[in-house]
Amino acid sequence: MAPHGKTWKNMKKQEKEEKKVEWKKQFDTKTLVKGYDYYCDGAVEDMDIFNDSIRADVVGTQSYEVEITLNDGKIGGMRCSCPYAADGRRCKHMAAVLYVWSDRCASGEAPKISDDADKDLFIRPRTDESRRRKSEAVRKLVDEADLSVVRSCLASILEEDEKLLIRFHRMVKKPAGREDIKCYKRQVDMIARRYLGRDRFISYQAAYGFVSDLGEVLYHDAERMIGDGQYMSAFELINYIFVLLGTVDVDDSDGHTGSMAEGIYELWAEILGQVDAGGKQEMFQWFTTHMDGSVVDYMEEYIERIIMEEFTGETYTAQKMEFAEKMIQSSEKKDSEWSRDHDVGKWSAWYLSLLEEQDCGRDKIEDFCRKHWKNTSVRKYYIDRCIRDQNYDMALKTLEESISLDRTSRQLIARYSEQKKEIYLQQGNQKAYVEQLWALLLEHKIGDLEIYRELRGQYSEEEWREQRERIFTELSNNVRLTEFYKEEKLYNRLLECVLKSSGLSTLSQYADILKEKYPEQILQKYREEVDRLASGATDRKRYREAVARLRSIQQLQGGRKVVEEMSEQWRKQYKNRPAFLDELGKL
């Protein structure tokens, strides 16, 4: 008989229960709560439990890899690829994995028997460390294999996979010929067809795979060509991928194509630094001829950048100026007023920077600006140049003209008004400077706290008390005054705003400031709002939020008693909501 009358079944149950809670002592409460949220949201994926380790991916804003060692079923070392855990701290991702592990232990799931080499062979690597381990395991397997087996297996794989065949052919033969380039392009086309489908659209879910597959060609094959000195072959393949990226219809919400375009830009720059004059001119020609709308506009920006920033020296200055003039003329013919103004401004800015680079003198720059005076960007450039040259009278004159021409744009009027304010300050025109501050605060940058502080500095303490009341009166219909009350330490008025607000947003924002001076009012407001939150909760996520708010209340003076009362009330009021009661039990 088991000691103290315990059955074997009860002893094993107790052992499992101890295992479930023992690891929690290694985490602080805040981290456990966050980890539990991840666990509830199903963020733990691809989990493997071995007899000596646990491995899993935890998906939040990013995907992180967690690895935990086990010693006789007890938690040993922990590692996570997230930045928070970099210096050895216990993170929410580890906690989330251990919550799942506890559940599986409780359900009696048996761990897999680990074979160190094999388990590293078949992991899905997400971090540099896991990639290194997998690479070592693969190489070890190959080293241990008989040479005839390796050759037979390689031949079989290459017969079925053209992508690997091309790569192997290049590794053996070295130079990439025309047939190699044609094959690479065919691979790129196959990738596009595989992901586009019938509707000719790549969905959000498929976007990452699409870009990853293209990246494999780009970073394995094109980079290898660059390493072998075959710069123009690499350039041709890179451009083929770039044009595809710039024409395919893809949901790129996570910015994968933008990241790849940045990588392509870096490869372009690397090639430019290696090719001879003839190759460089050939590249310049390709870039300038592909500013014709053949790729989507945001991808054209990468071509613009490389033309203007990477092709340097006198040889290209004249060519770039000629190109910029052509782009300005082309942009002036666009039907859309917005596109016309935007593109003329963009290319004018490039052209003006080239004029300055050549030190062409004031007259030539002024002639160009007057020719394109209606363009906002040109006038902004001219104003900035006048200010830089301390030609304040001309800057003010141009600002007044721009305020009239751009009167429909509140953003531009605010910019011009702020520039006027700075000029008056530089000129020592105190009266105009203060008037401009008032205009900014009440008309152009309504309720801007920095302008408010700058204006306050122009008055004595006694004068300011009167002036701020005028400001509060004039702003009250346009902005919330809470930040101004906080700034002026008018806590009684701030409290009044908080008590009148609905929801928890304003309360949470100012509770720390007000809780010492008005503890009862803040506590009561929290109670009302959290009660309202609980009454509208219909799922576990909302229940967790309500309970989390109770934890916040506990930190307030007298909060523990209020939380006890509310918890008891909720258990009675929401007795038919088991998920809510479950969350309350974790309080």
Image (cartoon, rainbow, N blue to C red):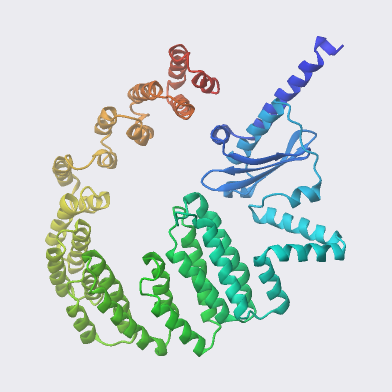
Vertical side of 322 occupied by 473: above or below: above
486 sits left or right of 64 in the view: left
- The one of 66 and 485 positioned closer to us in this rendering: 66
Q: Position of residue 180 (x, y in %)?
A: 62, 76
Q: Quadrant of residue 497?
A: top left
Q: Quadrant of residue 585?
A: top right
Q: Position of residue 303 (x, y in %)?
A: 42, 73
Vertical side of 182 occupied by 499: above or below: above
Q: Position of residue 125 (x, y in %)?
A: 66, 52
> Residue at horizontal 25%, vertical 79%?
329
| Res 35 seen here | yes
| Res 311 seen here | no
Q: Which of the image's four quarters has the N terminus? A: top right
> Residue at horizontal 75%, vertical 50%?
120
Vertical side of 42 occupied by 85: above or below: below
- The one of 427 and 294 positioned closer to us in this rendering: 294
204 sits left or right of 44 in the view: left
Q: Position of residue 153 (x, y in %)?
A: 79, 62
> Residue at horizontal 15%, vertical 54%?
439
